[in-house]
Image (cartoon, rainbow, N blue to C red):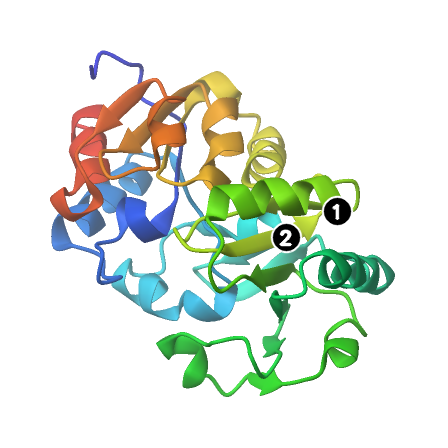
């Protein structure tokens, strides 16, 4: 299982993969990540999270590594806690997408993630982090689409996420790239062609690292492009069935330090 060459780049999803279910970084996982950078390899966190959700992770990891945020739309330097690159949905395209989805799936509620904050419709239910954030605001649909954004989120109160994803892709897949990662009817949309894989491949190329020299870890459908691109792919045991079926290897669940277990063997 572990008879692999030492990777030059480790790419891992966070929520549901490297982080515990409560969102924390276990001491064992933090130590394993330190081994990666101490060995001279690149450590890249590839997540659907926006940068504003990365402060706690950055602190727990002693500001190690780079983060590809918002499913590939934003590159965030954990050492400096700054966005260093962005690939945004154009405002005109954003308006077209919202109009098309609202006309065909009227139950949807929308939220938009910008480079420096977020806005949401009044009927878009916020999680605990967003309820306490100072960067967010309640806005009407027309206001949401007035400037480019990193990610558009569409929430359906009842629809199965896989079914909703297929519906959204059929309606606006020519305008944006849609995925999901939360286990509920919440679709995340990036600029057309932007995925975790495209951002990771670009970053690797800049550092003259081949896909065959990359090991990647994930748990949800938004990880599939990255897992397919990487030379070696792992799912944690708690992953979505489609992810478990697509990877080279399966490790222990996120709450059992599955990512750390692999990295400890690779970087002994």
Question: How many numbered marks are there?
Answer: 2
Q: Which mark is residue 189?
A: 2
In terms of secondary structure, where does tag 1 sit? helix
**Which quarter shows the C terminus?**
top left
Q: Is residue 265 above or below residue 116?
A: above
Residue 208 lies, in percent from the top left, at 57, 26
Residue at mark 1: 172
Q: Is residue 202 above or below residue 153?
A: above
Foreground tag (2 vs 1) = 1
Q: Which residue is at the far top?
A: 3
Residue 6's quadrant in the figure? top left
Examine the rendering and report whether any part of residue 125 can be seen. yes
Q: Nearer the viewer, residue 268 or 118?
A: 118
In terms of secondary structure, where does tag 2 sit? strand
Residue 17's quadrant in the figure? top left
Would residue 172 be found to the left or right of residue 79 on screen? right
Residue 256 lies, in percent from the top left, at 12, 43
Residue 11's quadrant in the figure? top left
Q: Is residue 147 above or below residue 62?
A: below
Q: Are marks 2 and 1 in contact (CB under 8 Å)?
A: yes
Q: Nearer the viewer, residue 8 or 26?
A: 26
């Amino acid at each position: 299982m572990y008879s692999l060459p030492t990777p030059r780049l480790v790419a891992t999803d966070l929520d549901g993969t490297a982080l515990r279910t409560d969102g924390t970084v276990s001491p064992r996982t933090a130590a394993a990540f330190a081994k990666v950078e101490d060995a001279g390899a690149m450590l890249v966190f590839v997540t659907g999270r926006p940068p504003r959700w990365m402060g706690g992770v950055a602190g727990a990891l002693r500001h190690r590594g780079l983060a590809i945020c918002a499913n590939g739309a934003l590159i965030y330097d954990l050492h400096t806690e700054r966005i260093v690159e962005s690939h945004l949905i154009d405002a005109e395209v954003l308006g077209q997408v919202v109009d098309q989805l609202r006309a065909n799936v009227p139950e949807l509620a929308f939220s938009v993630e910008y480079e420096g904050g977020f806005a949401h419709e009044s009927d878009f239910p916020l999680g605990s982090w967003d309820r306490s954030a100072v960067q967010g605001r309640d806005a009407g649909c027309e206001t949401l689409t007035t400037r480019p954004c990193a990610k558009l989120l569409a929430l359906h109160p009842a629809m199965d996420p896989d079914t909703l994803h297929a519906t959204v892709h059929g309606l606006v897949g020519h305008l944006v790239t849609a995925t999901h990662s939360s286990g509920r009817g919440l679709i995340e949309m990036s600029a057309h062609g932007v995925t975790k894989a495209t951002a990771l491949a670009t970053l690797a190329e800049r550092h003259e690292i081949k896909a065959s020299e990359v090991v990647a870890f994930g748990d949800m459908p938004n990880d599939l492009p990255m897992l397919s691109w990487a030379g070696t792919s792992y799912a944690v045991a708690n992953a979505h069935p489609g992810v478990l079926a697509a990877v080279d290897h399966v490790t222990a669940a996120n709450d059992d330090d599955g990512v750390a277990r692999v990295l400890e063997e690779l970087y002994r």
